[in-house]
Amino acid sequence: MKLIANRMRGMQDILPGEIEKWEYIENIMKEQAKLYGFKMIRTPAIESTGLFKRATGEASDIVEKEMYTFNDKGGRDVSLRPEGTAGVIRAILENGMHNSILPLKLIYISSCYRYEKPQSGRFREFFQFGAEIIGGNSTTADIEIIDLAKSIFDKIGLKNIQLHINAIGCEGCQGNYIEHMKNFFKAHEQSLCETCRSRLERSPLRIFDCKNKECKQILKEAPLSLAYICQDCAEHFQRLKDYAYESEIDIKVNPYLFRGLDYYTKTVFEFVDVDSGENLAICGGGRYDNLSKEIGGPALTSVGLGIGMERLISVMDRQGVEVPKDKFCDLYFAPLGGPAKRESVKLVHLLRKEKIKVELDLVGRFIKPQMRYADKIKSKFTMVIGANEMEKRKAMLKNMETGEEIEMNLDENFIKDFKEILNKAEHSYQNEK
């Protein structure tokens, strides 16, 4: 059989058997975020291209190489979102949320799109958990967002995850540092790759993101931002280190960390898997005090983070983190004949109202194939209902693990009686574990 279309390169199908892992992680993220007072937000996957150009920087790799950009049927220049923060800030400003009580604490789990070479743990469509504190100008907002990420990793059960942080300065001291960096890179211009030479005037700090070996060698001699930050930024950074210590978070100051977006100020950070051999980042973020002004709003001092779901899952798999397995089915009904099917439909409906996982035959199989199906879906109990059972108003409930059979009355007490049997079986299973 030849399909008329296959999955596009860099996209992914997340199938049953794998999606349960995603749901488990997402539930932890949402539960931890609630403990910190965050609320959910959803924004469109498509935004005006200008939003991302202004937010992430025209010289960033995202804008220059990776965005899915096109004209829609109305001739508008639009793009699929490459990251989540810009759309959240746009939504806050457009809906007047910044006029409410600040700070706003928001989370989201969104699909993002970047046209880059697919590789292990990296896709063109990927999913990101994001958290933003909008209107939080204190260093306590920085440590709050960082501590949220750490609590998620701890709850999942990750080991050897280290926080890398750097101070890149506010708007004022960044300008001074950028001028020094321009002069430094001009002295090495002939040794820079073509991409970095194009960045030299527009956005020299993007050169820190370059993977070219020659450029990385030059960066080893580059002036570091920590030597150029103002007193206010230095104090902010010191407080952050102090708060991380109080929060029992292992930190490493990484003076070469800048992140790949133009909107960051003061604090940037990454959580890295130190056992990966290459300090693989599974979370990144920082402070972005000027982003709101950059896209046309008032000043809103803010800080946020993003966790890549695919990369997080790859680290979990490498570390052997086990995800609790969801129970498949509590009871499978095998009805034989029209009246028995009608009775089974009624009982299934009532049991599901009690939050019990129940299934019944949907295909019209004979009894033996039904029992094989019940075994495949790992049903704890099965019940065959045929003409004889309907006449006597009694049926045999079979425990699929022990083989024990219990006669049950098909009356108004059936739901209550089955719940008691199920609870007893689950309690016995927990004791055996």
Image (cartoon, rainbow, N blue to C red):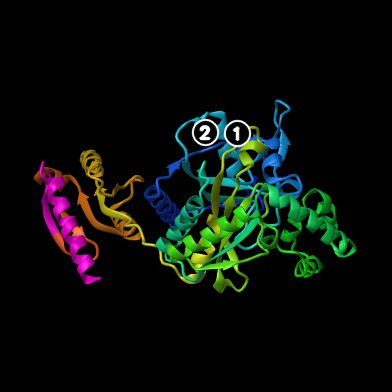
Q: Residue furthest right?
A: 190
Q: Is residue 323 magenta?
A: no
Is 115 placed left or right of 14 in the picture? right
Classify mark 2: residues with Cα within 10 Å, few (<14), some (14-19) or many (20+).
Answer: many
Residue 402 visible? The answer is: no
The three-letter code of the residue at mark 1 reads Pro
Q: Secondary structure at mark 1?
A: loop
Q: Residue at x 63, y 41 (%)?
A: 291
Q: Secondary structure at mark 2?
A: helix
Q: Position of residue 401 (x, y in %)?
A: 24, 65
Residue tagged by mark 1?
298
Q: Residue at x 70, y 36 (%)?
A: 50
In the rendered image of this protein, does residue 91 appear above or below residue 332?
A: above
The numbered dot on residue 98 is 2
In the rendered image of this protein, does residue 231 appear above or below residue 293?
A: below
Q: Which residues are magenta?
A: 406-433
Q: Position of residue 339 (x, y in %)?
A: 21, 39
Classify mark 1: residues with Cα within 10 Å, few (<14), some (14-19) or many (20+).
Answer: few
Is 253 placed left or right of 260 in the picture? left
In the rendered image of this protein, does residue 401 appear above or below residue 301?
A: below
The three-letter code of the residue at mark 2 reads His
Q: Are marks 2 and 1 in contact (CB under 8 Å)?
A: yes
| Res 412 quadrant in image | top left
Q: Position of residue 207 (x, y in %)?
A: 76, 58
Residue 143 visible? The answer is: yes
Is 221 placed left or right of 236 in the picture? right
